[in-house]
Every structure is written in structure tokens, then in C-alpha cells.
Amino acid sequence: MNDNYMKDIKSQKSKEEFTAKKERYIEAYGGRKTAHARARIYTSGKGLIVNNKDYKEYFRDKKNQITAYAPFLSVDAAETHRGSVHVFGSGIRAQSEAVRNALSRAFAKEEPSLKKRLRREGFITRDARMVERKKYGLKKARRAPQWQKR
């Protein structure tokens, strides 16, 4: 009987710890070309984590760092919110833009009044441009083989 009592106490503790650790977040998706990003915004802490790394470590180029972190600066949430993003596909530049799109949508979902400001800066709308497919008889999408006289 004593063993069962101890097991019940341990299971209750683990359930309490689990519910205490559970943090609320707002989730949104974003994309660019073939890059896809899932962003989560937490209302506690500060910083941005991309694929389990700091965003400055993941995006080595300063331009991509600025692009990815822009929504935080745009809505003045750099000190009050924390972001976690999972991004995959395409190249590093498209990934940074997908992160920006996903974070902006998450902020707009959390606070609808911010949507107008983010849309004005062009962060909410997904850039629909894609790579044009290669056509047969051509070297690339539009590049024709060099003409030969003989």
C-alpha cells in the first residue's frame, strides 16, 4: 500500500510539472519559393531561434539576419517576445524571407491591429514568384542554344 501511495504522489508531481512547463504560443506558417517556415511566438523572453540555433548563427549573412528579425523590430516586440522557427527547403535567402513571412503572420494573429502595419511593409503577403520551368529544345527556361551558321 505504501508503494502505491508513493507512485501516486510521483505521478501527480510529474503531471503538475508538465502542466507548469507548458507555455502558450501563437503559431503561423510562411513561405517563399520552395522554402516553408513554421513560426511560434512566445510572450515571455526575447530572441529568435531558427532550427535550434540562434538566428545570427543560422543566417550568417547580415542581410538575411535583418530580413528574418524585421517583424520583431517592426512591431517593437524585440524585448517582450521570443520566437522559435522551423524552416526547410530552397536556399538560405528564401528561408530568411519565409521566416519573416511566418513571424509576421504570427504577430498579426496575436494582435490584429498590427496586421495593417505589417502588410504596409510587405511582410504578410507571400511572394508568389517561382522559378520558371525549363522548356525542351532550350538550355534553360528561355536561353536558346547558340546559333551556328555551319
Image: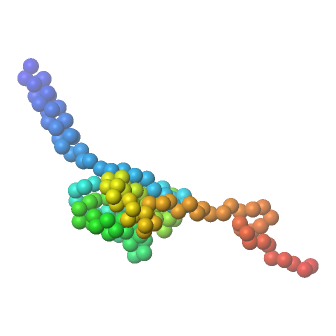
Looking at the image, which is closer to me, 15 or 37? 37
**Residue at the spot x=84%, y=77% of the render?**
147
In the image, residue 10 above or below residue 27: above
The image shows residue 55 at horizontal and vertical percentages of: 35, 66
Tell which residue pokes out farthest to the top in this image: 1
In the image, residue 41 above or below residue 18: below
Residue 51 seen from this side: no
Tell which residue pokes out farthest to the left in this image: 2
The image shows residue 6 at horizontal and vertical percentages of: 10, 28
Tell which residue pokes out farthest to the right in this image: 150
The image shows residue 19 at horizontal and vertical percentages of: 20, 40
The image shows residue 138 at horizontal and vertical percentages of: 77, 67
**Residue at the spot x=48%, y=60% of the render?**
125
Quarter of image, res 72: bottom left
* Count of numbered marks: 0
In which quadrant will I find the N terminus? top left
Residue 121 seen from this side: yes
Quarter of image, res 117: bottom left
Colouring of the image = rainbow
In screen coordinates, is 71 left or right of 45? right
In the image, residue 103 above or below residue 140: above
**Residue at the spot x=58%, y=63% of the render?**
129
